[in-house]
Amino acid sequence: MTRNVTLTGRTIAVWGLALLILLLALAPGEARAQASGEGSVSLPIGTQAPDAELEDLEGNRVRLLDYVRGKPALIEFWATWCEQCEALQPQLDEIQRRWGDRINIVAVGVGVSQSVRRIKRHLERHDPGYPHLYDRDGAAVRAYDATTTSIVVLLDENGKVVYTGVGSGQDLIGAVERLLSS
């Protein structure tokens, strides 16, 4: 018996991203890059931050850079199911507590294996006090070359990338301290 299967571009993209996340999760060691010169995850240091169209949790179309303009910013690409993202949360909470008036934090929920409803349920249990956006179509993931979750990008007040990292071993508090003291 022969079965015809039709795949849409979006289906292929979602499966491709899921496969990439799986391959990165199985890679030896923790891939990490910081401004200290270990290489680059996401955008190269010094790059101007690109904009992307996403959704807020009410389904309204929004621009990512509208959430990060005016002062330094931290953007995290995360998912409710990401254990490394969960491990980073205490640092993000501390950054929000200590410097929330000096830095914009935005969580970009990737559109792989999660929905706005799932994000809202997660925030009912723990709302850290900064915006969460939903990248349904992967526009921000593509713009920031965020090939996995737990990627963090720090921007200076001019919107230039000063730090990128991935994984639970990042020193986000130290990176933010350096950014705010420069």
Image (cartoon, rainbow, N blue to C red):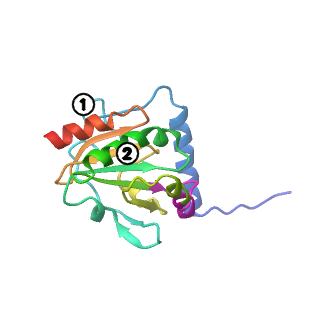
- Residue visible at 51% across and 30% down? 27
**Image location of residue 43, percent across then percent down:** 31, 46
Query: Mark 1: which amino acid?
Result: Ser
Lower position in the chain sequence, tag 1 or tag 2 = 1
Dot 1: few (<14), some (14–19), or many (≥20) neighbours within 10 Å? few
Q: CA distance from mark 1 to mark 2?
A: 24 Å
Q: Furthest residue to the top? A: 29
Give left or right: position of 132 versus 120: left
- Residue visible at 46% across and 43% down? 85
Image quarter (top left, top right, bottom left or bottom right) of the N terminus: bottom right
Q: In which image quadrant can residue 165 be found? A: top left
Q: In which image quadrant can residue 141 be found? A: bottom left
Which residue is tagged 1? Answer: 36
Q: From where the camera sits, is residue 150 visible? A: yes
Q: Nearer the observer, disc 1 or disc 2?
A: 2
Q: Furthest residue to the right? A: 1
**Image location of residue 55, percent across then percent down:** 43, 67
Query: Mark 2: which amino acid?
Result: Asp
Which residue is tagged 2? Answer: 93
Say what secondary structure mark 1 lies in. loop
**Image location of residue 30, percent across then percent down:** 44, 29
Which contiguous range is marked in magenta?
A: 109-120
